[in-house]
Image: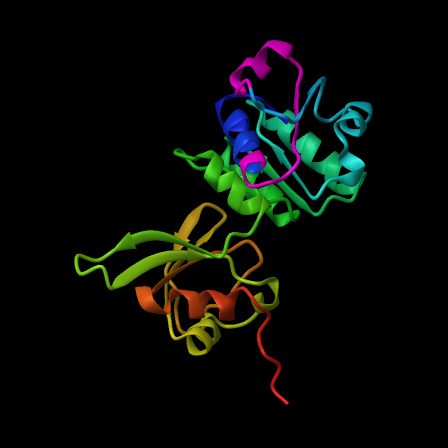
Amino acid sequence: MGCGRVGATLAQSLEARGHSVAVIDQNPDAFRRLDADFQGNKVTGLGFDRDTLRTAGIEDTYAFAAVSDGDNSNILAARVVRETFGVENVVARIYDPHRAEIYQRLGIPTVATVRWTSDQVLRRMLPMGTTDEYRDASGQIQLAQVDVHAGWVGRPLRALEEASGARVAYVTRYGDGVLPTAGSVLQESDTVHLLLRVDDAPAVERVLTSPPKVES
Protein backbone atom coordinates (compact mmCIF):
# COMPACT_ATOMS: atom_id res chain seq x y z
CA MET A 1 0.00 0.00 0.00
CA GLY A 2 1.44 3.33 -1.13
CA CYS A 3 3.14 4.00 -4.44
CA GLY A 4 5.52 6.75 -3.38
CA ARG A 5 9.26 6.54 -3.93
CA VAL A 6 9.78 3.70 -1.45
CA GLY A 7 6.59 1.84 -2.37
CA ALA A 8 7.44 1.86 -6.07
CA THR A 9 11.03 0.74 -5.41
CA LEU A 10 9.83 -2.01 -3.09
CA ALA A 11 7.26 -3.29 -5.60
CA GLN A 12 9.82 -3.44 -8.39
CA SER A 13 12.42 -5.10 -6.14
CA LEU A 14 9.94 -7.81 -5.20
CA GLU A 15 8.93 -8.37 -8.82
CA ALA A 16 12.60 -8.61 -9.81
CA ARG A 17 12.97 -11.40 -7.22
CA GLY A 18 10.23 -13.37 -8.96
CA HIS A 19 7.27 -12.47 -6.74
CA SER A 20 3.84 -11.45 -7.99
CA VAL A 21 3.01 -7.99 -6.67
CA ALA A 22 -0.03 -5.75 -6.28
CA VAL A 23 0.27 -2.03 -5.52
CA ILE A 24 -2.53 -0.04 -3.90
CA ASP A 25 -2.75 3.76 -3.95
CA GLN A 26 -5.72 6.10 -3.75
CA ASN A 27 -4.13 8.37 -6.36
CA PRO A 28 -3.94 6.69 -9.80
CA ASP A 29 -1.26 9.17 -10.89
CA ALA A 30 1.08 7.63 -8.31
CA PHE A 31 1.49 4.53 -10.47
CA ARG A 32 3.57 6.61 -12.88
CA ARG A 33 6.48 6.01 -10.50
CA LEU A 34 6.52 2.37 -11.58
CA ASP A 35 8.62 1.33 -14.55
CA ALA A 36 6.78 0.90 -17.83
CA ASP A 37 7.52 -2.84 -17.81
CA PHE A 38 6.07 -3.42 -14.32
CA GLN A 39 3.74 -6.40 -14.60
CA GLY A 40 2.05 -6.22 -11.20
CA ASN A 41 -1.54 -5.35 -10.38
CA LYS A 42 -2.27 -1.64 -9.87
CA VAL A 43 -5.30 -1.05 -7.66
CA THR A 44 -6.77 2.39 -7.02
CA GLY A 45 -8.34 2.70 -3.57
CA LEU A 46 -7.73 2.89 0.16
CA GLY A 47 -5.34 0.28 1.48
CA PHE A 48 -7.42 -0.40 4.58
CA ASP A 49 -10.67 -0.92 2.64
CA ARG A 50 -11.55 -4.62 2.63
CA ASP A 51 -12.96 -4.62 -0.91
CA THR A 52 -9.87 -2.84 -2.21
CA LEU A 53 -7.66 -5.38 -0.48
CA ARG A 54 -9.63 -8.27 -1.95
CA THR A 55 -9.26 -6.76 -5.42
CA ALA A 56 -5.51 -6.65 -4.84
CA GLY A 57 -5.51 -10.34 -3.92
CA ILE A 58 -5.07 -10.10 -0.16
CA GLU A 59 -6.69 -13.50 0.41
CA ASP A 60 -3.76 -15.19 -1.36
CA THR A 61 -0.96 -12.98 -0.05
CA TYR A 62 2.28 -13.92 1.72
CA ALA A 63 3.32 -10.43 2.87
CA PHE A 64 1.93 -6.89 3.05
CA ALA A 65 3.73 -3.55 3.41
CA ALA A 66 1.91 -0.34 4.35
CA VAL A 67 4.22 2.43 3.14
CA SER A 68 1.97 5.40 2.43
CA ASP A 69 2.84 8.81 3.89
CA GLY A 70 0.27 8.59 6.71
CA ASP A 71 0.92 6.82 10.02
CA ASN A 72 -2.77 6.32 10.76
CA SER A 73 -3.53 4.84 7.35
CA ASN A 74 -0.52 2.54 7.51
CA ILE A 75 -1.26 1.10 10.92
CA LEU A 76 -4.98 0.75 10.18
CA ALA A 77 -4.21 -1.12 6.96
CA ALA A 78 -1.64 -3.31 8.73
CA ARG A 79 -4.12 -4.26 11.44
CA VAL A 80 -6.92 -5.02 8.96
CA VAL A 81 -4.59 -7.23 6.92
CA ARG A 82 -3.26 -9.02 10.02
CA GLU A 83 -6.51 -9.36 12.00
CA THR A 84 -9.13 -9.72 9.24
CA PHE A 85 -7.23 -11.60 6.55
CA GLY A 86 -4.68 -13.43 8.71
CA VAL A 87 -1.56 -12.34 6.81
CA GLU A 88 1.38 -12.94 9.16
CA ASN A 89 4.15 -11.05 7.36
CA VAL A 90 3.04 -7.44 7.74
CA VAL A 91 5.18 -4.32 8.08
CA ALA A 92 4.06 -0.71 8.57
CA ARG A 93 5.96 2.50 7.99
CA ILE A 94 5.54 4.76 11.02
CA TYR A 95 7.16 8.18 11.26
CA ASP A 96 6.43 8.65 14.98
CA PRO A 97 8.89 6.46 16.96
CA HIS A 98 6.63 6.45 20.04
CA ARG A 99 3.77 4.99 18.02
CA ALA A 100 6.17 2.55 16.40
CA GLU A 101 7.12 1.11 19.79
CA ILE A 102 3.45 0.57 20.69
CA TYR A 103 2.73 -1.27 17.46
CA GLN A 104 5.89 -3.34 17.76
CA ARG A 105 4.52 -4.58 21.09
CA LEU A 106 1.29 -5.53 19.29
CA GLY A 107 3.35 -7.72 17.00
CA ILE A 108 3.36 -5.46 13.93
CA PRO A 109 6.91 -4.80 12.68
CA THR A 110 7.48 -1.13 11.90
CA VAL A 111 10.09 1.01 10.21
CA ALA A 112 10.53 4.30 12.04
CA THR A 113 14.07 5.53 11.45
CA VAL A 114 15.21 8.92 10.22
CA ARG A 115 16.96 7.40 7.22
CA TRP A 116 15.07 4.38 5.96
CA THR A 117 14.84 2.66 2.63
CA SER A 118 12.85 0.07 0.74
CA ASP A 119 15.53 -2.48 1.71
CA GLN A 120 14.58 -2.08 5.39
CA VAL A 121 10.95 -2.83 4.57
CA LEU A 122 11.97 -5.75 2.38
CA ARG A 123 13.97 -7.34 5.19
CA ARG A 124 10.92 -7.29 7.45
CA MET A 125 8.74 -8.87 4.77
CA LEU A 126 11.14 -11.53 3.48
CA PRO A 127 13.97 -12.74 5.76
CA MET A 128 17.23 -12.44 3.84
CA GLY A 129 19.83 -14.23 5.99
CA THR A 130 22.97 -12.13 6.52
CA THR A 131 23.52 -8.55 5.34
CA ASP A 132 27.01 -7.04 5.36
CA GLU A 133 27.03 -3.68 7.19
CA TYR A 134 30.77 -2.98 7.69
CA ARG A 135 34.18 -4.58 7.11
CA ASP A 136 37.50 -3.80 8.72
CA ALA A 137 40.48 -2.58 6.68
CA SER A 138 41.78 -6.13 6.18
CA GLY A 139 38.44 -7.29 4.79
CA GLN A 140 38.49 -10.27 7.16
CA ILE A 141 36.08 -9.11 9.87
CA GLN A 142 32.55 -7.92 9.20
CA LEU A 143 29.67 -6.40 11.11
CA ALA A 144 26.54 -8.08 9.78
CA GLN A 145 22.81 -7.94 10.40
CA VAL A 146 21.38 -11.44 10.70
CA ASP A 147 17.75 -12.56 10.42
CA VAL A 148 17.58 -14.85 13.45
CA HIS A 149 15.02 -17.68 13.52
CA ALA A 150 12.08 -17.05 15.86
CA GLY A 151 13.03 -20.16 17.81
CA TRP A 152 15.91 -18.24 19.41
CA VAL A 153 13.56 -15.68 20.99
CA GLY A 154 13.71 -15.90 24.78
CA ARG A 155 17.20 -17.39 24.79
CA PRO A 156 20.31 -15.58 26.11
CA LEU A 157 22.34 -13.74 23.49
CA ARG A 158 25.35 -15.73 24.67
CA ALA A 159 23.57 -18.85 23.39
CA LEU A 160 23.62 -17.35 19.89
CA GLU A 161 27.34 -16.67 20.29
CA GLU A 162 28.12 -20.17 21.55
CA ALA A 163 26.16 -21.81 18.73
CA SER A 164 27.49 -19.65 15.90
CA GLY A 165 30.98 -18.64 17.02
CA ALA A 166 30.14 -14.99 16.26
CA ARG A 167 29.88 -12.13 18.75
CA VAL A 168 26.74 -10.05 19.30
CA ALA A 169 27.91 -6.45 18.82
CA TYR A 170 24.51 -4.93 19.61
CA VAL A 171 20.80 -5.33 19.00
CA THR A 172 18.30 -2.83 17.69
CA ARG A 173 15.20 -2.86 19.90
CA TYR A 174 12.19 -0.62 19.19
CA GLY A 175 14.45 1.75 17.25
CA ASP A 176 17.14 1.98 19.94
CA GLY A 177 20.60 0.44 19.94
CA VAL A 178 21.23 -1.83 22.92
CA LEU A 179 24.64 -3.16 23.98
CA PRO A 180 24.36 -6.72 25.30
CA THR A 181 25.16 -7.60 28.91
CA ALA A 182 25.83 -10.99 30.47
CA GLY A 183 22.12 -11.51 31.12
CA SER A 184 20.70 -10.12 27.86
CA VAL A 185 17.94 -12.20 26.25
CA LEU A 186 16.76 -12.05 22.64
CA GLN A 187 13.34 -10.41 22.35
CA GLU A 188 10.82 -10.84 19.52
CA SER A 189 11.37 -7.36 18.08
CA ASP A 190 15.18 -7.45 18.17
CA THR A 191 17.40 -7.00 15.14
CA VAL A 192 20.74 -8.71 15.78
CA HIS A 193 24.08 -7.29 14.62
CA LEU A 194 27.05 -9.67 14.80
CA LEU A 195 30.82 -9.40 14.51
CA LEU A 196 32.25 -12.40 12.66
CA ARG A 197 34.93 -13.54 10.26
CA VAL A 198 33.90 -13.05 6.64
CA ASP A 199 34.76 -16.66 5.81
CA ASP A 200 32.46 -17.86 8.61
CA ALA A 201 29.40 -15.94 7.41
CA PRO A 202 27.71 -18.86 5.57
CA ALA A 203 28.06 -21.14 8.60
CA VAL A 204 26.81 -18.47 11.00
CA GLU A 205 23.82 -17.83 8.76
CA ARG A 206 22.97 -21.54 8.61
CA VAL A 207 23.01 -21.82 12.40
CA LEU A 208 21.04 -18.70 13.30
CA THR A 209 18.43 -18.79 10.54
CA SER A 210 17.49 -22.27 11.75
CA PRO A 211 15.81 -23.15 15.05
CA PRO A 212 18.20 -23.93 17.91
CA LYS A 213 19.07 -27.56 18.45
CA VAL A 214 17.16 -29.21 21.27
CA GLU A 215 19.42 -30.85 23.81
CA SER A 216 18.48 -34.46 24.56
Residue range in magenta is: 15-36
Left of 140 or right of it: where is 172? right
Q: Give residue 61's quadrant in the image.
A: top right
User: Was residue 18 drawn as part of the magenta stretch in this picture?
Assistant: yes
68 vs 28, nearest the viewer = 28
Q: Quadrant of the N terminus?
A: top right
Residue 21 horizontal/vertical position (percent): 65, 32
In the rendered image, the residue lying farthest to the front is: 37
Residue at 82%, 24% in the rendered image:
51
Q: How is the image coloured?
A: rainbow
> Where 212 falls versus 80 (above or below)?
below
> Where 164 falls versus 115 (above or below)?
below
Residue at 18%, 61% in the rendered image:
138
> Where 15 falls versus 134 (above or below)?
above
Res 197 visible: no
In the rendered image, the residue lying farthest to the bottom is: 216
Q: Quadrant of the C terminus?
A: bottom right
Q: Give residue 103's quadrant in the image.
A: top right
> Where 33 falls versus 9 (above or below)?
above
Q: Give residue 67's quadrant in the image.
A: top right
User: Was residue 89 drawn as part of the magenta stretch in this picture?
Assistant: no
